[in-house]
Image: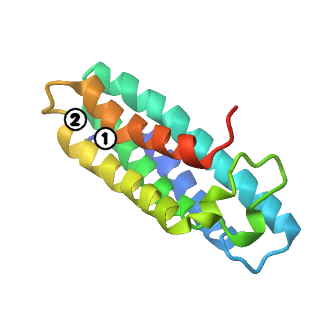
Amino acid sequence: MHFPIKHIANNIGTCLFIIILVFLGSNAYSDQSAEDTIKARKALFSKNYKTAKRVQSLSANGEFDEAKELMIEMSKNYEVLLGLFPENSKEGFKTGALPTIWQDKENFNTLMKKSSVDMIKLTSLIETTDDIKGTVGKLMWGNCKACHSKYREEH
């Protein structure tokens, strides 16, 4: 598999970002930490959205190797997001997260885990599916829609 320098640098940056986020995921932090946590999760969701658009485009153009790398990155991001919803980050700092996340934490976490697993599943199906758009829609965009419809404020 071919790994251009920009992907290696991106992966190193992602690893450093994940390490920082792990430290921010604890419930023991102050309000400033809550702000940092909210900003971190918003940034990670935004990154996943931008990456998802890129995955869609690459897949549609048959550029599967690069699309798969991004799918794996998204999968890892969903795992990190599991730790970015501590009790002290329910409100403030322009969070779009609904209280339903904390009221229904088990199902929210299950959806984040499913999103991660589905991105890995997509890496194994993308080259052989007869319906790239439908498969990407089901395994990637379907999870985004499920989360937004239940756990995010309308925007």
Position of 64 with respect to 26 (left or right) is left
Callout 1: SS: helix
At x 47%, y 28%, the residue is: 53
At x 40%, y 51%, the residue is: 115
| Residue kind at label 1, given as amino acid type | Lys
Position of 52 with respect to 98 (left or right) is left
Residue 137 figure quarter: top left
Q: Position of residue 19 (x, y in %)?
A: 59, 67
- Between circles 2 and 1, the one closer to the viewer is 2
The residue under label 1 is 68
The residue under label 2 is 126
Do tag 2 and tag 1 residues touch (Cβ < 8 Å)?
Answer: yes
How far, Cα to Cα, is label 2 from label 1? 8 Å
Seen in the picture, residue 85 relative to 144 is either above or below; the reply is below
Q: Is residue 128 visible?
A: yes
| Residue situated in front as seen by the camera: 77 or 15 | 77
